[in-house]
Image: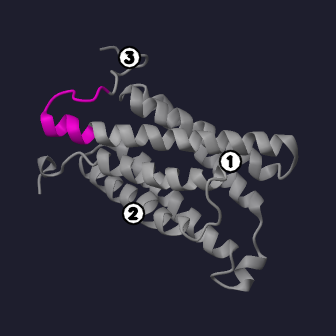
Amino acid sequence: MSEKSYADPTALGLFGLAIVTLVASSQKLGLATGVSYLIPWEIFLGAAAQIVAGILDYKKKNIFGGTAFFAYGLFWMAMALSALINTGSLGEVLQSGVDTREMGFAFIGYLILTIFLTIGATETNKVLFFIFLFICFLFLGLSVSTFVTEGGVHTAFHKIAAVSEMIIALLSFYGSGANVLNNHFGRSFLPIGKPFGVFVKR
């Protein structure tokens, strides 16, 4: 199949991100409790949908989109597996070896990746840029609240993570809808904002 045979997978990837962050943020904000019903959404929307989008972007030779969707898809797969381990679903031996600081280091690693992606997003569109910007705040909040497990600092950064995640969900819904409708109608039906033009002069 030629490159032209592949449609833009951005709408699918952003929809997967929107759903999983909406469900995850509801738990962080105290609107829902437990993780049992979060796990399926992490696997199928957070992971599978974004991995499929990443594969298609790579086939279109879009390194930026492929890396972003694939990396975040794998993140949500790891989060689902971590939840299963933490709840003892995969056995007491694995559960007894849990050290949340390892998760904190993973969050830092994803924060570093997201900073690079945010720089790259300045030359995509403004909706994507702000999605990545708030993902930076999400991983900052997750990193600090994971290492500082109690007190005002933990509460503050946990709240930063929760609010950022909800904003990511709302922006991703808009971005997904805009991608579908703009491509469907062949015009800017929903504006997504032009690139900033900071690093690439247009």
Residue 60 position within the rendered picture, expressed as x and y whole percent measured from the top left: 24, 47
User: Which of the 4 quarters of the picture holds residue 180?
Assistant: top left
Residue 27 vertical placement versus 157 (above, below): below
Residue under label 2: 48
Q: Residue furthest front?
A: 31
Look at discs 3 and 2 and give the one toward the viewer.
2
Residue 114 position within the rendered picture, expressed as x and y whole percent measured from the top left: 54, 40
Residue 101 left/right relative to 137: right
Residue at horizontal 75%, vertical 52%? Answer: 146
Kind of residue sitting beneath label 1: Leu
Residue 29 position within the rendered picture, expressed as x and y whole percent measured from the top left: 65, 49
Residue at horizontal 50%, vertical 41%? Answer: 168
Residue 42 left/right relative to 56: right
Q: Which mark is residue 71?
A: none
Callout 1: SS: helix
Kind of residue sitting beneath label 3: Gly
Q: Please report contact status of discs 1 and 3: CB closer than 8 Å, yes or no.
A: no
Question: Which is more N-terminal, label 3 or label 1?
Answer: 1
Residue 202 vertical placement versus 71 (above, below): above
> Which colour assignment does the render follow?
one colour
Residue under label 1: 142
Question: Which is more N-terminal, label 2 or label 3?
Answer: 2
Using the image as rendered, state which of residue 102 and residue 127 is in the foreground: 127
Using the image as rendered, state which of residue 104 and residue 88 is in the foreground: 88
